[in-house]
Amino acid sequence: MSWVTRFPMHERVMLLLVLGIALLLAFSAFFAVSTVVLRIRNDLKRKRWAKREARWQPILLDVLAGEREPDALWACVGAGDHLYFIDYLMRYARRLRGEERMVLSRLAGPYLKDVAKRLRRGDVEQRARAAETLGTLDLQTYAAEVVGALKDPSPLVAMVAARALARREHPQFVVAVLDQLHRFDNWSTSFLASMLAAVGPDASPHLRGMLPDRGVPVRVRVVAAETLARLHDVGAADGAARLLAEEGDRDLLAAALRLLGQVGRPVHVPPVRVLCASPDFVVRSCAVEILGQLGTPEDASLLGAAMDDPSLWVARHAARALQKIGGDGALEALAASNHPRAALAREVLAQD
Amino acid sequence: MPVDVGWLFLDFFNLLVLAYFVVLNTFYLVTSVFAFNALRKYARQLRSVDVESLMASGAAPPITLLAPAYNEEATCVQAVRSLLTLKYPEYEILVINDGSRDRTLDRLTEAFDLAAAARAPSAELRTAPVRGIYHSRQHPNLWVIDKENGGKADALNVGLTFCQTPLFCAMDADSLLEREALMRVARPFLEEGNTIAAGGIIRIVNGCTVERGTLSDVQLPRKLLPQFQVLEYLRAFLSGRMGWAALDATLIISGAFGLFRRSIVVEAGGYTTDTVGEDMELVVRLHRYCREKHIAYRITFVPDPVAWTECPESLRVLGRQRDRWQRGLIDSLWRHRRILLNPSYGRIGLLAYPYFFFLEMLGPLIEAAGYVCFVITVTLGRASESYMLAFLMVALAFGVALSLSAVALEELSLQRYPRFRDLLHLFFLAILENFGYRQLCNFWRVRGTFSMILRRRGWGSMERKGFQTGKSS
């Protein structure tokens, strides 16, 4: 840099500024050129895609209809098109089921090895996509890889793998998924419950076992209770009722109450009544709601009192519960009065 | 001697202005870099996680759309029709007629067969009186609440009071949501249980064609003023908000489209009614509330759920809008100044807040004074070549580079403007906006700052033309 020192100070500053402007102009030019290149590349890609798809589609439809053999389509897939072809099949795979899905799996077969490589070596998004693809197109062959992805360092990959494994057609993987459930802390419990419920009744025995197990994280037990509720698992009712008496966690109590709301019987009502006086308004609100499903006209006074609850949510559930147990008379009286919750009573009656 | 002091002050101030531009543009550059990375990641994630199947899984939380309407007779029916076509498993629409003086309520009643109905509140927030509640006989998920005028924040509070779902979406009644917008903006709530708010991107609908409540053709507006705003919005959302979200320091969610967890907003007291920047104020308050109560939370931004909105086409209306935005910004930042440089608020207190406080709030004053000083310095012949070059570099070249980077980000991720000529035109705008438009916006922001200091109130009305429904000629 000795040449720089040959310049006087103010010229050095000038030089620096000129360089700065040149750099910024170069940046600007770079952004402009790269945007144009991106646009041209994207347009070309789209056109190439459209051309390929136009070639593949009639053959694919013939293969799905059983009128042509898969070889006819494979012959049209170029050496550099393997992953494009898999993406193309994935779009159909999301919509098709049964026999047609099996045809798609067969068509994808020769190219899935490339996808499996990505599951091991790709970056996070590539691994997630690979797990989704393998799980959708050929879980039988690549089960070990997808189960392995449950332990991927990325929670996104693990979740995609869990979703691929939690399916009614493959109940054998439910234990592997349940073992990793604690990793999905960020995902909402209702989402996890919905994912597990997709396995169907085969998941129930495992979930029932988790419900009272204090060695299992509370959040996982909440998910178990919510899943059992979605599965309408009658066998879980007694366990849920026991939880009401033994546990104190708000989310667990609420989940157990919702489970009883689905599968409970009159014999399970007493602990629900007790929780109508819980100091926690969330628990109170759930208990009142469930009392509306399991209770009898004798619960009308309890529910009537809940209409005065400081929480508007408890009152709202109480109004609906009153209606469900046949307490319309009490509601009508309330609606006609100057009671602060009269509007609520009117709303619930209008929904009838 | 006084002349020397004057020159000294001028030189010092010129340096201050240059430093301000350097710091401001460096912040923009840093957020753009973070945004680039986050957008790339997001686009690839979208391919690995099928949003539709996520939502079809039965886990999608029910949402209430809160659409405050004030004198929206031109657009309200079409906007509500558009809301009714959204793709989402379970949602309710609450249009809150904020004491409109035009025929907004009549239009809605005629179009959707509204009838008086009972609906009890689910929260207790102080609001202007409700005059009537109406339920559509055609669409069971559409309700209209007619209330006395109290401003947008008050209307949103009324909506919150009657909201019965765990999430609510605050929006403008004249905004047009894309059909998948709710699905996409709700995704963070599924993926991260502690998400309490998520914002979406706002784009300019002027120039686009809307058919049956859906956008059928996207193109740049024909007038120059809205065109500049298209570029501004791209820069603000793709470079700015995306970058701040990547830094986990989102401080603004646009009032035109944001999804919130109802319970936490109610706990925090709902919207503040004595401010014109209720959207930013709420987000800042949520940060403060959660940090002070030690509640784990996340506030984020999702780049592709799009709400399209009409932007001002006249200088007068645009000036009023920018004046209001600046007042809202100052009001929100001043109310919560306790956060400024306070380590207990984490990167919000140490990074985002100082940026908005010193560069966005005080910046327009420095910038405006900088332009004046520049003119004085040049006129009096005191401007050295190096000063002129430096000013050119930080005030113009940097700005052009940043605007072009926003266009590049758009092309990299979302590509909403399909015409090649629109893309080239955006390049042209990126240069042109630095000669007049940017200075004009700065002037309005300075005016807003003085209005705030003088405690002038008022929203300034927006003149709506309604969406363009035919093919543009």
Image (cartoon, rainbow, N blue to C red):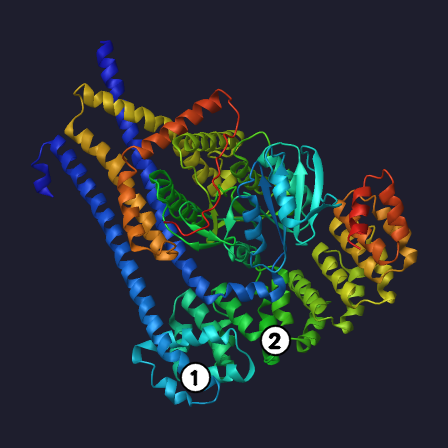
**Disc 1 or 2, which lies upstream in sequence?**
1
- Marks 1 and 2 sit apart, C-alpha to C-alpha, by 27 Å
Q: Is residue B450 left or right of residue B231?
A: right
Q: Which residue is mark 2?
A: A174
Q: Is residue B452 above or below residue A77?
A: above
In percent of width and height, residue B349 lies at: 48, 38
Whether A334 is drawn above or below A70: the answer is: above
Q: Nearer the viewer, residue A156 or A66?
A: A66
Image: B257 above or below A126: above
Looking at the rendering, which quadrant does residue A110 occupy? bottom left
Three-letter code for the amino acid on which mark 2 is drawn: Val
The amino acid on which the numbered mark 1 sits, given as a three-letter code, is Leu
Question: Which residue is denoted by mark 1 in the rendering?
Answer: A107
Position of residue A232 in the picture relative to residue B211 (left or right): right
Out of B285 and B57, give the one closest to the viewer.
Answer: B57
Residue at image position (60%, 34%) is B100
Residue A267: mark: none
> Dot 2: few (<14), some (14–19), or many (≥20) neighbours within 10 Å?
many
> Which one is closest to the eye, mark 1 or mark 2?
1
Q: Is residue B380 visible?
A: yes
**How many other residues sit within 10 Å of disc 1, few (<14), some (14-19) or many (≥20)?**
many
> Which subunit holds the residue at mark 2?
A
Q: Position of residue B312 (x, y in %)?
A: 43, 37
Q: Give the x, y percent position of residue B216.
A: 44, 56
Please identify the quarter of the rendering in which residue A191 is found. Answer: bottom right
